[in-house]
Amino acid sequence: MDGIKDKVILVTGAASGIGAEISNYLCREGAIVIASDLKKDDVQKRVDELNKQGGRAYSLSLDVTQENDWKEAMNFVRINFNRLDGLVNNAGIFFKAPIEETSLDAFNRVMKVNVSGVFLGVKYAISFFREQAKDNQKPTGSIVNLASLAGLLAIKDMGAYCASKAAVRNMTKSIAVECGNNGERIRINSINPGTIKTEMTIDGFGAEFFDEYEQDTLPIPFGEYGLPEDISPAVAFLLSEESEIITGAEITIDGGWSAGLTGVSL
Ligand SMILES: NC(=O)c1ccc[n+]([C@@H]2O[C@H](COP(=O)([O-])OP(=O)(O)OC[C@H]3O[C@@H](n4cnc5c(N)ncnc54)[C@H](O)[C@@H]3O)[C@@H](O)[C@H]2O)c1
């Protein structure tokens, strides 16, 4: 993918799962990757591995809920690269409980990480894109937000998480319209993964969830759950020059899960 080579991309939540794999894929495609996470040591280990394999990766401690961390992250980018081409707002937390068992604190925490964290990332990246635009040039840059199938479809006992991911989807579209209407080439799109095998879902559903399912009974046309490797090429495409006219869009990667009523013939 030529359109991603040498681009400076910041990835949040890069210490595990989908964010780690996105960082890995972007490095293989020749991008300069700033892999960030609140788990500082874990993300440093990932970065060491990426660099051993010939990648150009840098680690950064960034809690997406902390505005000051975003300011420091932008300073880090400015000092070390003096350029930012893309941001992947991947950091997120999962939460599952019936509504009456969901405390206000738990609800607010999900919103803070999954929605406010994305909001802050978008705000500071856009500001950076504007600042780096040369005189008479349109600001450019690409942001990819990790929403979810849970932001498209209702899922039992997941009201807080579903609400947070639906918010990410429409915030993405609204800001895409805002930047486009300003005459800027700042693009912002989202990805809706189905169920992907990562630490998040193993912790949330149990390890056996992925090992003990009957393909025939899954409501997924392709009959299987996904892996982080299924997500990263689409993220890279949305960050690259190959998608230069795509904004306010979303790519759902769910094996056909959300496309229809699998197994139902009327
Ligand atoms: N795994 C799935 O099935 C699935 C499906 C749809 C969407 N998603 C979304 O994809 C993203 C990645 O999920 P994953 O499955 O790889 O999860 P994961 O738990 O494996 O990884 C999430 C990473 O985010 C980091 N993180 C959490 N809170 C943070 C914060 N405040 N600041 C910075 N980093 C923080 C964690 O330390 C972790 O490294 C999330 O936004 C998730 O909601 C996942």
Image: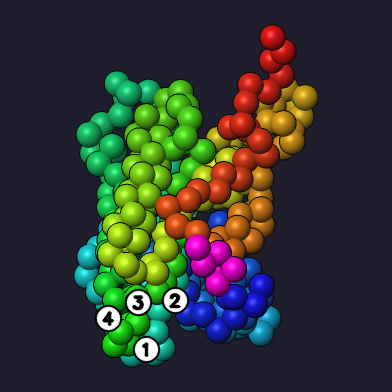
In this view, the residue in front, 256 or 67, is 256
Residue 256 in the image: x percent, y percent? 66, 35
Mark 4: give few (<14), some (14-19) or many (20+) Cα within 10 Å.
few
- Kind of residue at disc 4: Glu
Q: CA distance from mark 2 to mark 3?
A: 13 Å
Q: CA distance from mark 3 to mark 1?
A: 17 Å
Q: CA distance from mark 4 to mark 3?
A: 11 Å
Mark with earlier residue (2, 3): 2
Mark 2: give few (<14), some (14-19) or many (20+) Cα within 10 Å.
many
Foreground disc of the pair 2, 3: 3
Is residue 165 something that shows in the picture? yes
Label 2 element class:
loop
Label 3 element class:
loop
Magenta region includes residue 165:
no
Foreground disc of the pair 4, 3: 3
Q: Mark 1 highlights which residue?
A: 82
Locate the C terminus and report the quarter of the image it occupies: top right
Foreground disc of the pair 3, 1: 3
Q: Which residue is depicted at the point 47% across and 74% down?
A: 9
- Kind of residue at disc 1: Asn
Q: CA distance from mark 2 to mark 4?
A: 12 Å
Is residue 57 something that shows in the picture? no
**Range drawn in magenta:** 240-245
Label 4 element class:
helix
Callout 2–callout 4 Cβ contact below 8 Å: no
Mark with earlier residue (1, 4): 1
The correct choice, above or below, for 247 with respect to 72 in the image is above
Residue 28 in the image: x percent, y percent? 66, 75
Q: Mark 3 highlights which residue?
A: 138
Mark with earlier residue (3, 1): 1
